[in-house]
Image (cartoon, rainbow, N blue to C red):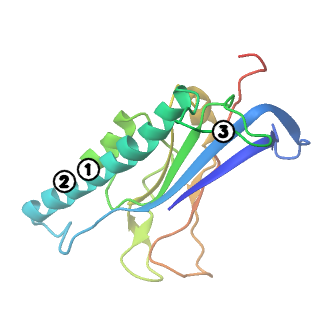
C-alpha cells in the first residue's frame, strides 16, 4: 500500500509554528509485507535461498518499478503527454522522500537488507539487537524482520543528519498491550529542507 502526502507547510521543530514551504514536499509511505515461505529459517538452506530469491524480486519491483519510475518522472518535471495542471498544482517541488516500512521477513545480515542499503535507502532503526518479532504473543522478541527505510540518501535525505536524528527511534515493548507477535516501531524521520533558492 502506498500513501502520497503533499506538505505545503512544515514545522522545523516539534513545538515550532507551521511555516509555509516555498514549494510542495511529496512524501511517499509504502507499507509492505514481503514473502516468507513455509519452513524458512528452520535449518534448510534450499528453502532459505528460495525465500531470498522471491524477496529480492519483490525489492526490485518496489525500488525499480515504483520508486525509480516516480523519481524519473519527477526529474523530467512531471511531463506527460496531454497533462494539464489545475488550481495550485506545480511541477516545481522539493525532492520526493520515500519511506518504506513493514514486515520484510529478512534479517539484518541478509542479501535483501543489503539490497535496500545498496539502492540508496537508510535504515531508520539504529538498534537491531532487540528484535522486532517474537515467537508468539506475549513472548520477548528474538528476530528482527521489521524495518523502516527512507531515502533516497543524498538525493532526498542527508545520511549524516539522519544518523544524528534517529537515535531515539526504537522498538516499543509494552507488556500491558499485546496485539501481535510483531512489536511496533517508534520512528521519527529527520527531514531537512534546503534553504529557499537551493
Residue linked to disc 3: 84
| Residue 93 in view here | yes
Asked if 92 appears above or below 3 in the picture, the reply is above
Residue 56 got which mark?
Answer: 1
Closest to the observer, 182 or 72: 72
Q: Are marks 3 and 2 in contact (CB under 8 Å)?
A: no
Residue 159 visible to the viewer = no
Q: Which residue ends up furthest to the right in the rendered image? A: 17
Q: Quadrant of residue 37?
A: bottom left
Question: Which numbered tag is attached to residue 53?
Answer: 2
Task: Give percent across and percent down for residue 177.
Answer: 61, 81
Please tell me whether mark 3 or mark 2 is closer to you in this view: 3
- Horizontal side, residue 152 vs residue 195: left or right: left
Q: How many marks?
A: 3
Toward the viewer: 184 or 87?
A: 87
Nearer to the camera, 99 or 109: 99
| Mark 3 Cα shell of 10 Å, populated few (<14), some (14-19), many (≥20) | few
Q: Secondary structure at mark 2?
A: helix
Q: Nearer the viewer, mark 1 or mark 3?
A: 3
Residue 192 lies in quadrant: top right
Q: Give me the residue at 46% from left, 71% from top.
A: 182
**How many residues crowd mark 1 within 10 Å: few (<14), some (14–19), many (20+)?**
some
Q: Are marks 1 and 2 in contact (CB under 8 Å)?
A: yes
Residue 84 spot, x, y in % from top left: 66, 38
Identify which residue is drawn at 52% across, 36% down: 81
Q: Which mark is residue 71?
A: none
Distance (Cα) linking label 1 and label 3: 37 Å
Amino acid at each position: 500500500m502506498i500513501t502520497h502526502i503533499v506538505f505545503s507547510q512544515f514545522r522545523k521543530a516539534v513545538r515550532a509554528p507551521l511555516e509555509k514551504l516555498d514549494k510542495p514536499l511529496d512524501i511517499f509511505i509504502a507499507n509492505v509485507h514481503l514473502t516468507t515461505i513455509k519452513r524458512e529459517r528452520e535449518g534448510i538452506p534450499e528453502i532459505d535461498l528460495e525465500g531470498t530469491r522471491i524477496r529480492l524480486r519483490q525489492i526490485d519491483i518496489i525500488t525499480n518499478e515504483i520508486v525509480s519510475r516516480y523519481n524519473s518522472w519527477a526529474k523530467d518535471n512531471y511531463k506527460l503527454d496531454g497533462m494539464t495542471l489545475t488550481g495550485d498544482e506545480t511541477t516545481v517541488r522539493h525532492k520526493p522522500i520515500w519511506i518504506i516500512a513493514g514486515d520484510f521477513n529478512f534479517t539484518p545480515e541478509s542479501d535483501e537488507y543489503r539490497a535496500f542499503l545498496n539502492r540508496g535507502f537508510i535504515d531508520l532503526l539504529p538498534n537491531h539487537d532487540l528484535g522486532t518479532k517474537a515467537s508468539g504473543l506475549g513472548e520477548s522478541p528474538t528476530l528482527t524482520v521489521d524495518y523502516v527505510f527512507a531515502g533516497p540518501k543524498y538525493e532526498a535525505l542527508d545520511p549524516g543528519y539522519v544518523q544524528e536524528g534517529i537515535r531515539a527511534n526504537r522498538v516499543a515493548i509494552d507488556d500491558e498491550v499485546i496485539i501481535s507477535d510483531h512489536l511496533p516501531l517508534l520512528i521519527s524521520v529527520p527531514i531537512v529542507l534546503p534553504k529557499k533558492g537551493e
